[in-house]
Image: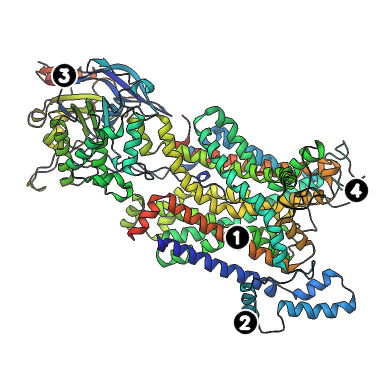
Amino acid sequence: MSLRVDDLTVYYRSLRGDVKAVDGATFSIEDGEIMGLAGESGCGKSSLGKSLIRMDARMKHVGGRVELDGSELPIADDAKMNAFRFRDVSIVPQYSMSALTPTRKVGTVARELLESRDVQFDTVKPELVRRLTLVGLSEDVLDRYPIELSGGMKQRTVMVISTLLDPSLLIADEITSALDVSSQRAVGELLVEFRDRGFVKSMIVITHDLAILYQIADTILVMYAGKLAEKAPAETIVSAPRHPYTRLLISSLPEVGVRFDETRLAGIPGKPPSLLSPPAGCRFRDRCPLAFAKCEEEPPFVEIEPGHEVACWRTER
Amino acid sequence: MLRYLARKAAIYILTFFVAVTIDWAIPRFMPGDPVEGLLSRMHAQPGAEQALSGYYSQAFGFDVPLWQQYLNFWAALFHGDLGVSITNFPTPISELIMSALPYTLALLVPAILLSFWAGNKVGALAARRKVLDNTVLPASYVLTATPQMWLGIVLAWLFASTWAIFPVSGAYALDIQPAWSLEFVLSFLYHWILPFSALFLVAFGGWAIGMRNLIIYELESDYSNYLAALGAPSKLVRKYAYRNALLPQVTGLALALGAVVAGAIVVEIVFSYPGLGTLTLSAIQNRDYFLIQGIFLFLITGVLIANFVIDIAYVVIDPRTRIGMQGS
Amino acid sequence: MSVSEPPQPGVAVAGETVAGPASGAAAVSEPGATVAPHVHSEFLHFALRNWKFVAGATIVLACLLVALVGPLLTDNAPLAFTGPTDQPPSSEYWFGTTSYGQDVYSQFVYGLRAAFVVGSLGGGIAWVLGAGVGFTAGYRGGWIDDVLNMLTNVVLVIPTLAILIIVAAYLQVQSYWAEAVIIGLTSWPWAARAVRSQTFSLKTREFVDLARLSGRSTRQILTTELAPNMSSYLLMMFILLFGGAILIGASLDFLGLGPSESISLGLMMNNAFLASALLLGSWWWFLPPGLGIVALVGGLYVMNVGLDEVFNPKLRET
C-alpha cells in the first residue's frame, strides 16, 4: 500500500476566524511502514490524523490531495469517505476507553457495526475471537458491557475491532497518552505485531512521546505549528536530527540514569505561535537559536538526503 | 442491585411516614382550633353546633392524648379506613376515592405514557432535522409553559363550546350507565379526548425539549464519533444515541410524576370529569378536610409506588447501574 | 412533562475541560488552563447577540413593564363591580368585563403583578434553599451529604401540589407573599439535586485542588474558584424556579386555595370557569390570564435556553 499526501491544508472554523491547523503537508508512507507523527500539543498532528479518516464538524478541507493505494481519498466529502472508512482507513482513537457505548454489550456493538458495513458477523467472528485472544482477551469479552472491562481491556478491544477488516492504513491517535510506562510498551508492541501479522499494512502513530516512537516507528515525522518540520527514519531523527526544533526536542529528553543536578533538563523557551494568524516565514523563527535573515521566507520541506526531509534554510547545501 | 433497590424502598417508606405524619399533624398544629374553624365556615344552626362539635372532636380524636391520636391514625390507615366524608355523609372516603380513581387513571396513564413516547420520538427527530427543530422546539417551549387547566379551558372553548365537536364536560353521556358496552366505551372515548389532550400536549412539550437536547449531546459523544469514524450509517449512531438518551429521561419521568398528577387534578375540574380532581375541588369548597386528607394520602402512595416501579425499570435498562451495584 | 420539574438538560452542565498537560519528551508545551472567565464583558457581548436570550428577555421585561405600569393606567380596582356585566373588549374596558361587572384589564395587570411576586419570592426561596442544601451536600460530602440527600429525596418524591393543597386548605392563605413562601418551601428539592451534582463535578476539577494545595481557605475557595463557575448555573436555575413557581401558584389559585381577597391570573381563570364563561363564550375573560402566563413563563424558558448557549460555547452555533 502507499499513502501520498500532497499539500494537505485543513483549517478549523472558530468564532474568531480560521485556525490553520494543518498547512501544506506533503509526505508519503510506504507499504509496511510505521510512521510516527510527533510534535507538541496544538501542532496539528491530531488534526492531520483525523483529516485522513473523518473530519470534525468544525474542520474544513482547504486544499491538497490524499491518495491511498493509487486512488484518491475523498476526505472533503463525508458521504463518499464512508466507503473507505473501516475497510481502507481505520482509526484507534484517543478516547478508546469511552469509544464503546455503555448500554450495549461489546459483542453486540461489534456485530451491529459490522453488519451495518455489510459484513456478515458470523463470517468474521472466528477471526475476531482469534485476534482477541492474541491481544490477551478472552472470548467472553464480547458478552460483557464496557463498564465491566478495565481501561486497558477496552483499549485492546477497540484496537481489535478497528483493525478487524485489515485496513491499509491505521491511524493510532495518542493511544498511549493515558497509560503508564509498561502499558505503553505493551500497546506499542501490539501495534508492531499487528503490522507484522498483516492485520494492518501501514500505520500513523500520533503521539508527543518521542521515546515510544523510537521503539516502534520506522520513520518519524515531526510537526510544528501546523507545518512539517522533519521526516526521517527513527534512528536518524533521534541520533542525527537536522531541524533545530527536532534537535532541541531530542536534547530536552531526560536520559535514564542522568540526574538533574548533573545535567540540567533543557526546555525550549517561548511558546508556539497562534495558528489563527501565524507569522509569515518559518514558524519556528522566534524560538530558534539558529534563526537568520532568510528565515523570514518560509523554507520548503525538501529532501536533503535519501529518506530524510527537512524544512529549514540552515540545512541547505 | 438488590441493595440499591432496598435503599430506594427504604427512602420511599420513610417518605410515606413523613407524608402521613404531615397529613396527621397539619390540622392539629395549625393556628386556631380546626373544629371551631370548620363549624364557623359551615354556618351551622346553634343547636346543631354542639352535636357537630362533639362529633368532630371525636372524629379528629381530640378527646384522647396526642400520641394516641397518632397511633389511632396509623391503625385506621392499615385497615383502609380513611374516615368518613363530611359532605357525602355517611359514605366512607375510601369508597369515594375508589369510584373516582378509574377516571383519573384513565386520563393519567395514557397521558404519561403517550406523551413520553411521542415527545421523545419527536424530540429525537427534531435534533436532526433543522426544519423540524425550528418548529417543534418553539412550540414545545410554549406548550411546556402552558398551565394545563388553561389549555383545557381553551380546548373546551374551541372544540366543545364554539365548534361543538366534543362534549364540554363529564366522562360519558348522561343517559348511559357505565358498563362494558360499546355504547359506553364510545361515549367514554368521546368525552375523554379533550381532557386527555390538555394533559398530553403540555407533557409532550417537556419531553420533546429534553430529548432534543440530550440527543444533540449524545451525538457528540465518544462512542458516536467512533462509530461514525468507522463509517457506521447515521441510523445506527442515532439508535445508540437514543438508547443512551432515554436513561436520563426515565429518571426525569419519576421527577415529573408529581407535576402530571397536579395537572390531571386541575384538568379534571375544567371538564367536570368525575375523577379525583373534581372530588378534590368539592372537598376544598366544602371544607371536607377528611376527604382532602384521604385524597392526599392516596395520591402520595400512588406516586411513591410509581416512583419505585420506575426505579426498578431504570435498573433494568441501565447496565451501569445493574452491574455497578453488583460490584459494591 | 410539566414544568415544575424542568427537564435536566435544560440546565446543562458546563462543558468539560480538555485533558491536562502533555507528558513525556516535549517539555515545552503549556498545560491547558481553565481561567476564571472575564465574565462581565464577554457575557454581555455574547448574550446580546443570542436571539433567544434577547427575545425571551424582551418578553419578560415587557410583562414586567405591564405589571408595573398597567395598574397606573386604570382607575378601576380589580375586584370592584364597576361596569356592565359580560362586556367584550371596548374602548372603555380594554379587556371587557366579567360576569360580575369587573374590569378584566384591571384584573389582568394586578394579576400579573401577583405572578411576579409569587415567581420571584417563591422561586427565590426555593433557590436559596435548593442551592444551599445542594452546595453544602456536594461540597462537604460524607455524612452531611447522606443526611441532606435523604431529606432532599423525601421532599422530592412528595407531590408538591398535594402538600400545598393540605397546607393551603388549613392555612387559609391571604396574601401572595404567604403563598410564595409555601411554594418556595416545597419546590427546592430538584434544585438541590442539580446543584449538588454540579458541585460534585466542579469539586474534583484540578483548579480546586490547586487552590487547596496553595493553602486557600474553604471560604476563599468557595468565593473565588467555585462561585464564578457555578454562577451561570445558579442563574439559570433561578429562572427555571421562577417560572415553575408561577405555574404552581396558578394551579393553587385555580383550585381556590390562594388568597381570595385579591386577584391573580389563576384566580381569574377559576372565577371565569365557575361563572361558565366558557359556555357564554366570554373569551376576553379567560384567555388573557393564560396568555399572560404562557408569555411570561415561556419568555423565561426561552431566555434560559439563550443563556445556556451563552455560557456553554459548545452549544453555540458557529
The reply, left or right, for residue A260 in relation to residue B251 is left
Q: CA distance from mark 4 to mark 1?
A: 47 Å
The residue that disc 3 covers is A313
Question: Of marks 1 and 2, which one's residue comes earlier in the chain?
Answer: 2
Q: Residue C82: x percent and y percent?
A: 90, 48
Q: CA distance from mark 1 to mark 2?
A: 27 Å
Compare residues C10 and A117 and report the one nearer the observer: A117
Q: What secondary structure is marked by label 4? A: loop
The residue that disc 1 covers is B302
> Which amino acid, mark 4?
Thr
Q: Which mark is residue B67?
A: 2
Pick out the residue farthest to the right: C84
State how many labels appear: 4
Let me know if residue A271 appears in the view. no
* Nearest to viewer (mark 3 / mark 1): 1
* Nearest to viewer (mark 3 / mark 2): 2
Q: Chain of mark 1?
A: B
The residue that disc 4 covers is C82
> Which amino acid, mark 2?
Trp
* Nearest to viewer (mark 4 / mark 1): 1
Q: Chain of mark 3?
A: A
* Nearest to viewer (mark 1 / mark 2): 1
Picture layout, residue A185 above or below residue B61: above
Picture layout, residue B165 above or below residue A44: below
